[in-house]
Amino acid sequence: MPSTIRVRASAGAEQTDVQSLIQHPMDSGYVKDAKGELIPAHYIETVTFEHGGKVVFTAFWGPAVSKDPYLKFKFSGGKKGDDLKVTWTDNLGKTDSSVSKLG
Amino acid sequence: MVSAFARTALVALLLPASAVLAASAQETKEAYSAAKALSDKAAANKNQWPATLTALAAAKAAIEAGRHDEALSKAKEAEALARASIEQTEREKTAWKDAVIR
Amino acid sequence: MKALLAPAAGLALALSIAIPGIADAWAAEMVDPKADLKTFQAYFYEKFPNVKHEDFVNGPYSMDEGMRKQWEEKEEFPPYDFAIEKGKELFETPFKNGKTFADCFENGGIGVRQNFPRFDLKLGEVVTLEYAVNRCLTENGETPYSYVKDEMAAVTAYMASTSRGKPFAIDVPNDPRALAAYEAGKQYFYTRRGQLNFSCASCHVQNPGNRIRAEVLAPALGITAALPIYRSEWGGMGTATRRYMSCNSQVRGTPLAPDDELYRDVDYFLSFMSNGLPISGPGARP
C-alpha cells in the first residue's frame, strides 16, 4: 500500500522548512451521499512530526480540515540528511507514518 | 315535498357549476400532455431546463394524487418554462453570432 | 482573405453537390478557424496587456495577484500529485489482453496531450483525450471509464503531466466535417442557455478577471490547457466534461450526456483558440 504521506523538507542554516501533503478523505460526518445517507465521520485527529528524537510539531485536526490536507511549517535546527518522521492517527483509529530525509 | 324529477333537475343544474370551479381530470391530462410535448422539444434542442422537469414531475404527482387544481397549475408552469427554453434556442440560433469576438 | 476564396469556393461547390443549399450558407459565412484564432487571441492580449501570453493558461491566477500567491505556494506541493501517481499506475498496468494504453497512442501516449482534441477523419468526429482513452479501453475489451472523474481524471492527469510546457498544436483540417465540428463548438461557446440565459462567453469573454459570487473568472483563452483539474470545490479531480456539465447546471440548464459530441466540439474550438499556448495541466483551481 503506497504511503499516504508526502513530505518535502529543506534544512537551511538555522531552520528547516517542511511541507507535507496527506491523502485522507477528511469526511466531516455531516455530508450526505447521492442516496441521501450520511457519510460517516472519518478525519485525522493528530499529526506529529519528529526530528532528532523530539516532537517538533503537533497538529490537532478535526472535521473542519479539508480533504487531502496540505501542511507547511518551520522548525529551528535540522541538517541535510537528518530523518524526519511523520505520523497521523484518525478518529477511526487508523494510522500511517513515514520517514523522509531532510534535503 | 320535492319531486324526484325536481331533485334530479336541481343536481343537474349544480353539476356544471362545480366543473367550472375545479379542474377536471381531462383538463389536467391535456395540459400535462401539452407541457410534456414542449418539454420533449426542449430536450431535443439540447436545451432542457431542470425547472421544467421539476414542474412536470410535480404535475404528474398531483395528477396521480387526484389534486387536479394543483396539477393544472404545475402543468401550465412547466409549459411556460418549456416554451421559454424553446424560444431561447430559436433566438440564439442567430443571436450567438453577435457575441462572437470581432 | 482572398487566398481562402479559391479553395473555399471549391469546397462550397463540392458541398452544394453533396448537400443542396449549403453552398449558399457557406458563401454567406466562411468558416475560417485561423482568422478566428488571430481575433480571439488579440482580444485577450489587448484586454490584459500586463499578462504574459503564456500565462493565460493559468486561468484566474493570471487575473488576480492574491490568488496567484496562494496558488504558487500550493504548486510546491500540488493536490493533483496523487492523481498523477494513480494515473501512471493505471497507464502502465496491462489490460486483460496484455496490451496497454501505450499501444493506442502515438509515442506510447507520452508527451501527446497537446495534440488533443483531434478531428478523426475515419470516425468523422472530434476525439478528445478522454474519448481516445475510452476508445482504447473498449477496443481492448475493457470497461470504459466515467468521463468526469476518478480513473479518467487520473489517466489524463498523468498524460497531461508528460506534456507540461508543450504548446497546444490543434489541427482543424480542411475537411467539411472538421470545419462543421469546429463551427458547432464555436456556436456552442457563444450560445446562451439555461434559465439564467448565460453563454460560456458571458463569463469567460465578457468578464474574465471579474467575480461571479466568490470566484474570479478565468479568461477563455488557454482555459483547456490546465485540464484535468483538482478543484477545491469538488474536493477532487475533474475532467473537461465534468466542468462543462457543472457549468450547464450552474446556469440552470440540464447537462448533456458526458460523451455528447457538442462537449467534444466546444473542447475542440477552445483548444484550437489556445494554439501556441503551453499545456499547464494537470491544474489546481479553487
Image (cartoon, rainbow, N blue to C red):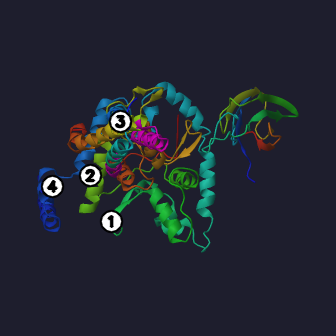
Q: Amino acid at mark 2?
A: Glu
Secondary structure of the residue carrying numbered label 2 = helix
Do callouts 3 and 2 mark residues in contact (Cβ within 8 Å)?
no
Q: Which residue was labeled with disc 3?
A: B15
> Is C227 situated left or right of C86 in this image?
left
Whole-percent x, y for residue A31 in the image: 65, 36
Q: Which residue was labeled with disc 4?
A: C26
> Quick check: is C27 in the magenta stretch?
no
Report the Cα–Cα distance between label 3 and label 2.
Answer: 60 Å
Whole-percent x, y for residue B62 in the image: 46, 40
Whole-percent x, y for residue A91 in the image: 80, 36
Quarter of the figure with residue C15: bottom left
Q: Do circles 2 and 4 both sit on a common chain?
A: yes
Q: Which residue was labeled with disc 1?
A: C124
Q: Is residue B31 above or below residue C49?
A: below
Q: Nearer the viewer, residue C159 or A66?
A: A66
Q: Quadrant of the N terminus of chain B?
A: top left
Quarter of the figure with residue B100: top left
Which residue shows up at 34% across the image and 42% down it? B27
Chain holding disc 2: C
Whole-percent x, y for residue B5 in the image: 34, 38
Q: Find the magenta span and give its range.
A: B39-68
| Residue C148 in view | yes
> Is C28 situated left or right of A19 in this image?
left
